[in-house]
Amino acid sequence: MAEKKEKKPRTPAQIEAQKRNSFKKGQSGNPAGRTPVHPDVKEAFKALTFTARDTLFDVMVNGKNDASRVAAAVAALNRGWGAPTQAVEVDVTHKQDWSALLNALDAHTAAKTLVGIAEVPLVIEAELLEKPDDPN
């Protein structure tokens, strides 16, 4: 059984270097993302499509454990045409009750429809608390 190595205490310089070189919270380690495949490389692999297809067919018909040839053919197809799409099944459950919001939205929509039919402007009723000073 392998022995566990003891962890050596870090020096203050090592701790400071880790603080300087580590990612800040919310900061990506690769902000630009993956470098795109150069169009010439894609075209070169697309040119191999028929050869890859022929290799797959040859292995399918005459195969004697040519796994590496199949892997190379699949890799060429994936690089030229992209990997096949994969179906993903998602089951989403909401914990919030949206019925009150939906009822309010229905009432609002109904009110807008009635106002639109009657062509009556909406009126906001209010009670005046103070009489404004008459400037005249």
Image (cartoon, rainbow, N blue to C red):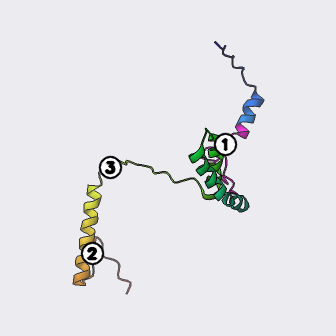
Q: Which quadrant of the figure contains the N terminus?
A: top right
Image mark for residue 123: none
Q: Which residue is mark 2?
A: 112
Residue found farthest to the bottom: 136
Q: Is residue 61 above or below residue 16?
A: below
The answer to which of 61 and 8 lies nearer the viewer is 61
The answer to which of 59 and 42 lies nearer the viewer is 59
Label 1 – label 2 distance at C-alpha: 52 Å
Image mark for residue 96: 3
| Amino acid type, residue under disc 1 in the picture | Phe
Predominant SS along the magenta part: loop
Q: Residue at x 24, y 79 (%)?
A: 115
* Part of the protein shown in magenta: 19-38
Q: Which residue is mark 1?
A: 23
Q: Is residue 39 above or below residue 74?
A: below
Residue 103: x and y in percent read 25, 61
Q: Residue at x 28, y 60 (%)?
A: 102
Which of marks 2 and 1 precedes in the sequence?
1
